Amino acid sequence: MRYGPALLLAALFLLVFSACGGSSSSPATDALYGVAGCWSVSIEELGVADFLLRVEERGTGYVVSIDGGPLRPVPVSDGRLVLPPLGGPNLAFGMDGERAAVFADVSHGANPQPGEPTGEFWAPFPVRRLAPSVYEEKAGAAADEHMRMELQFLYLALREWGERHDGAFPMPAEVARDAAFGRWLEREAAEVEVPWPTNPYTGGAMHAGAEPGDFVYAPEGDGFTLLGHLHDGTTFAAQGSPQ
């Protein structure tokens, strides 16, 4: 059977659209029709850093990814997806008329200043749709930057351990969330609520290994080497570690 150009173009569109969260099935609710896809969000005026958002429909609900992180289910409230906390006001994602938007809770409580809204008020902020290839590139870079920050935190914690143990660093088996070093770090960081480093690609606890988000740790004499794996499999050294 031969297919005409119009049918082939339609099939190609569906393949590209579904790669970034699109769906040919009916949406969970009419109010959310059009939210699936990849988006760039910028609402710095509210103290929220720019971020990337991926939305996919799964069964009767939706899952979202922030900055290349794992896809996670989110609740729906008043016809909008409730986004995870990102610092700043509460955020939701949905449709503002015929265009997608991030909604920020800009309510001012019981005693607003003159001219400020009273009660609950959600302000919409337009978002920009990204092509799948552009999103994948940007999301990978965002997750990699998170990985560098998490590994650097682990590096500084290891240095602190060494200073408190007469220059001796933990053995590799001790550098895990549920091992001696991890329990020590949990106690030390309890007051500032800094958790064990997170693998930005999976959302789980960072651990030794060879997959993206894993690290390689090796004590060497009076120092140590600490390397991390990025989303494309390349490695990098924490600041102060030899390559």
Image: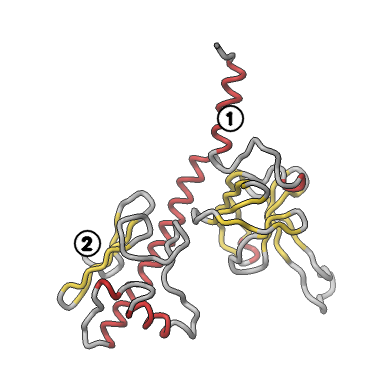
Foreground residue among 2 and 55? 2
Q: Amino acid at mark 2?
A: Gln
Residue at x 40% of width, y 61% of height: 147
Q: Is residue 103 left or right of residue 228?
A: right
Foreground residue among 240 and 70? 70
Q: Position of residue 102 (x, y in %)?
A: 68, 55
Q: Which residue is mark 2?
A: 243
Q: Residues within 10 Å of mark 1 (few under 14, many from 20)?
A: few
Vertical comparison of 67 with 168: above or below: above
The outermost residue toward the top is: 1
Q: Position of residue 157 (x, y in %)?
A: 34, 78
Q: Is residue 93 left or right of residue 217?
A: right
Q: Amino acid at mark 1?
A: Phe
Residue at x 41% of width, y 57% of height: 144
Q: Residues within 10 Å of mark 2 (few under 14, many from 20)?
A: few
The answer to which image quadrant residue 149 occupies is bottom left
